[in-house]
Amino acid sequence: MTIQEISAQLAAPFADSDIEWRYSSISKDKTSGLVVAYVTNRAIQNRLDAVLGIGGWKNEFVPWHADKKNNKESQLCGLSIWIEERNEWLTKYDGADDSETEPIKGGLSDSMKRAAVQWGIGRYLYEMDNVYANTEKEKFIKRSEYGKLNAAHQALVARLFGSKAPTPKPQSNGTPPAETQAPAPQNQQKPQVRPTQQARPAVQPQPRPQAQSVQNAPATPQAPAPERKQQNTVPPNSYKILRVATVANIKRKNENDTKLQLENADGKRFEVYVYYTNPQLAPGVVLTDCKITTIKNGDIVFYLLEEYTIYEQQNAA
């Protein structure tokens, strides 16, 4: 398996059951908060076994530094993967402090999760839009909120990977060999299969590109050009909507607000929040006469779009 193939399978999305959610911040009244998605450590181990086999990866933990003032230790996790085409182990490191609950176990688990992200495992979760969830007993996520959280994860997977998201399948290599012998059986099996599979397509794909090139040759009128010229009619001091996301309102229960990613005429992008939802706010819509205010909540700064006008572009005759 090549590095590109390994990378693609490791970076594939996970099932909802493999995702855990934690609060990154909680409102002052402790009724709701911003939650962040993580991949469970067990799911990471299963992914490594499925893609590489139990002998195709290994990890090690190295002491990092100690916080004597707070009586906390830190550790690095080195996650190594056997690369057949290079005939060597590649290792990537990341670290974490001991956690508050079960400090040693939590610290080891967190450092391995961070090292797994270095290999692309679960990295797509960093693209998740802000998700809020109501609390239970001022600390835990309400069970009734997990339907909404799973829906947010599914929407992210659909946006990044499409409807046909790749799912790694466990390797069927028979009885797993010892760790040092893991690469050898895989190198012996693949030359027996790949030449026969490559011998057939080597002849068949040749006529297909020729047919496609003939069909595609006349169909080259560059239609996007006039659409881009129409953008010049947009008035100055306007903003174009690039992305729309629905977020839960912290203070008003059972109500949602809207988060927009805007782009100004200079190509600068930033995010704003809008009270409530409006179906007219969609990607590609241009807003004018905008009143944007800056809101500060402690160290957190965000922008609120209080007033706006939806610009109606005139179609060219």
Image: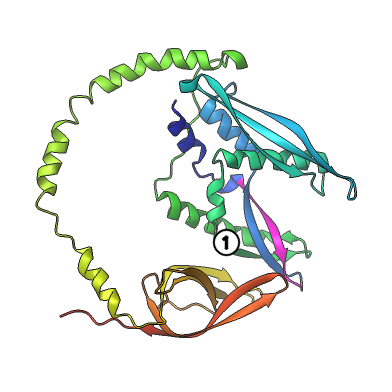
Say whether residue 232 is left or right of residue 127. Answer: left
Q: Residue at x 55, y 57 (%)?
A: 128
Q: Which residue position is annotated with label 1? A: 148
Is residue 178 at all visible to an observer of this figure? no
Could you tell me residue 175's position as x and y percent?
A: 55, 15
Answer whether residue 25 is magenta in the image.
yes
Q: Residue at x 29, y 21 (%)?
A: 197
Magenta-drawn segment = 19-29
Could you tell me residue 169's position as x and y percent?
A: 48, 32
Q: Quadrant of residue 191?
A: top left
Q: Residue at x 40, y 50 (%)?
A: 163
Q: Residue at x 71, y 70 (%)?
A: 299
Q: Look at label 1 and name its amino acid.
A: Lys
Q: In the picture shown, does residue 96 fall above or below 31?
A: above
Q: Main secondary structure of the magenta part?
A: strand
Q: Quadrant of residue 229?
A: bottom left
Q: In the picture shown, does residue 200 fall above or below 143?
A: above
